[in-house]
């Protein structure tokens, strides 16, 4: 059966607080052919304290070292009305709306909007009250694991399973939270280790530059791929620089779908339907390399191996050598036996 990787286009806060930009991001996600377009739902005051500093990458990407996280995030909130209109717009465009909640009230709000799937962001993997509430509210969980240890993943899983979320409804995403992630820090094999250790579906949330790593994750077995995208990398904001522009998102989706097709075979090594027609053209047969008379001994001096492959296979060479021609053969004529 052909694999279908769920592709989540992470709009996140790349709308810069503009509802019009959010609509444009939905359009770009639709054009790229992704499965979900995902935003972020939070109240800045519930997410960070007033003294929380910005991450190094946030300072670099915003060009502002004086703002706190609270000041930065306050400008990036989407209102309740924005959420409701975005959901309706996504429905009209036939793309699935998704969002990540970053506080307890936002979890409840997304549930009230009708969402059944919750994405746990990397920063909440050690937030017990948040994990417990998410497990009680939602039917399925996607758990991102940036910065996490295997023990921390195990502890989060235990919270889910103790609160009614079975492992078959959990997907764990390998992730690195540096924006952008250096290639040497990707450690993509960790995704396989997670799957083997915990027995859940696996996926990958990517923050590298480019599209190579998410494509590779699909070849390794990712069932979900998440990637940030933006309308323009040069826009002001914390996440734009490490995001894909629309044409890159489209290229990633196409490449992932190609990889899915390439790994969807039976696993048996046998001629494919498309290459059967090439067998006679590319393979070789035993042929006369000079005129041969009926009854003449067949030796290396009068027979050889050439295309096409519609005659006796060269694998029968030892059977043919030392026998006698049953008829006359012209040069390059297929030997019959």
Image (tube, rainbow, N blue to C red):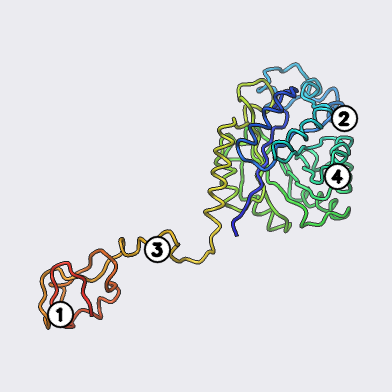
Mark 4 vs mark 3, CA separation in Å: 53 Å
Residue labelled with disc 1: 327
Report which quarter residue 289 is drawn in: bottom left
**In this picture, residue 277 sits left or right of residue 207:** left
Determine the secondary structure under disc 4.
Answer: helix
> Which callout, 4 or 3, points to the residue nearer the camera?
3
In the image, what residue occupies the spot 13% across and 72% down?
302
In the image, what residue occupies the spot 56% across and 57% down?
264
Residue labelled with disc 4: 134
> Which callout, 2 or 4, points to the residue nearer the camera?
4
Mark 2 vs mark 4, CA separation in Å: 16 Å
**In this picture, residue 286 sits left or right of residue 138:** left
Q: Is residue 298 above or below residue 133?
A: below
Circles 4 and 3: CB distance less than 8 Å?
A: no
> Which callout, 4 or 1, points to the residue nearer the camera?
1
Residue labelled with disc 3: 276
């Amino acid at each position: 059966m052909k694999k279908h990787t769920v592709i989540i286009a992470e709009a996140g806060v790349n709308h810069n607080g503009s509802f019009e930009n959010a609509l444009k991001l939905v359009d770009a996600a639709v054009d790229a052919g992704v499965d979900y377009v995902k935003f972020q739902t939070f109240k800045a005051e519930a997410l960070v304290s007033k003294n929380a500093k910005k991450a190094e990458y946030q300072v670099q990407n915003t060009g502002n070292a004086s703002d706190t996280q609270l000041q930065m995030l306050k400008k990036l909130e989407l209102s309740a009305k924005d959420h409701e209109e975005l959901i309706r717009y996504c429905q009209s465009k036939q793309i699935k709306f998704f969002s990540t909640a970053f506080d307890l009230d936002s979890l409840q709000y997304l549930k009230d909007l009708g969402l059944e799937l919750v994405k746990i962001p990397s920063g909440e993997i050690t937030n017990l009250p948040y994990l417990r509430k998410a497990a009680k509210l939602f039917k399925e969980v996607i758990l991102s694991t940036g910065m996490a240890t295997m023990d921390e993943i195990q502890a989060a899983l235990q919270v889910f399973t103790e609160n009614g979320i079975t492992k078959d409804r959990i997907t764990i995403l390998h992730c690195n939270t540096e924006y952008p992630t250096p290639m040497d820090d990707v450690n993509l094999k960790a995704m396989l280790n997670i799957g083997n250790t915990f027995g859940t579906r696996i996926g990958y949330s990517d923050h590298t530059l480019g599209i190579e790593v998410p494509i590779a994750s699909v070849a390794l077995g990712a069932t979900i791929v998440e990637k940030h995208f933006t309308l323009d990398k040069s826009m002001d904001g914390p996440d734009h620089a490490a995001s894909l522009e629309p044409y890159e998102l489209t290229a990633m989706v196409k490449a992932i779908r190609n990889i899915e097709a390439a790994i969807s075979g039976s696993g048996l090594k046998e001629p494919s339907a498309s290459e059967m027609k090439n067998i006679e053209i590319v393979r070789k047969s035993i042929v006369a390399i000079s005129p041969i008379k009926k009854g003449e001994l067949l030796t290396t001096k009068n027979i050889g191996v050439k295309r096409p492959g519609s005659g006796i296979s060269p694998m029968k060479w030892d059977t043919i050598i030392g026998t006698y021609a049953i008829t006359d053969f012209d040069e390059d004529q297929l030997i019959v036996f």
